[in-house]
Amino acid sequence: MALTLLRHAALHPKYQKRYNGWTDISIEPSLFDAKIAAPLCKQRFDHIYSSDLMRCQQTLSYMEMTPYITDKRLREVRFKVHIEGLSYQEVSQRMDFDASLLEDHKAWHNYICMESYDAFSRRISNFLADLPKNKEILVCTHGGVMQHMLLLLHLPPQQIGYLDWTRIEHYEL
């Protein structure tokens, strides 16, 4: 069957374009665009999974997509304490910032994240491996998790905005 990956709805503008990671931030109700979500709401899913963070659960509630199963493995990556909540611009002003880190995905990850690249990858791989087979599945999660799932499934990276989703017809790790 298929796997549909959905990024949570928009946050308040003061939290957008920031490294929010495990900070449990609410979506901004005034920015929820039901028209964007409508096509997905019409689909039937055998299983729906959500990050345990509030923004993903609220997204599914606003879409009236229940019941769903929360799974901590679907959380965004855990950023370092001194990076959490900052914008890229703020991170790039840090004394220890080195632009060459941007040339190596793993090096950049390890610079900004408390959770190692390998630990993050294992967490996401384990979640994907545990999904039931031959079912219609919806996963509501975070942009970084979605990007990593695409990487693990050998699919090209995508620009992923709030409430964006991608459907993967056939997937294997």
Image: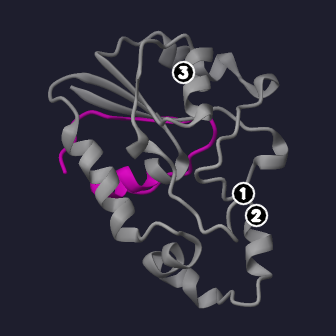
**Mark 3: secondary structure:** helix
Write down the residue under mark 3. 60
User: In terms of secondary structure, what is the magenta stretch mainly?
Assistant: loop
Distance CA(mark 2)–CA(mark 1): 4 Å
Q: Position of residue 27 (x, y in %)?
A: 71, 32
Vertical comparison of 147 with 67: above or below: below
Q: Secondary structure at mark 2?
A: loop
> Which residue is disc 1 drawn over?
18
Mark 2 or 1 closer to N-term?
A: 1
Q: Amino acid at mark 3?
A: Leu
Q: Determine which quarter of the picture holds residue 57.
A: top right
Q: Position of residue 18 (x, y in %)?
A: 72, 57
Q: Amino acid at mark 2?
A: Ser
Labels 2 & 1 near each other (Cβ < 8 A): yes
Query: In the image, residue 86 lies at what x, y percent?
Result: 75, 64
Identified by mark 1, the residue type is: Arg
Residue 87: mark in rendering: 2
Residue farthest left in this picture: 133
Crowding at label 2, few (<14), some or many (≥20) Cα neighbours within 10 Å?
some
Left or right position of 8 against 168:
right
Which stretch is magenta? 147-173
Residue ID at (36%, 11%): 44
Element type where label 1 sits in the image: loop
For residue 71, side relative to residue 172 (left or right)? right
Q: Earlier in the sequence, mark 1 or mark 3?
A: 1
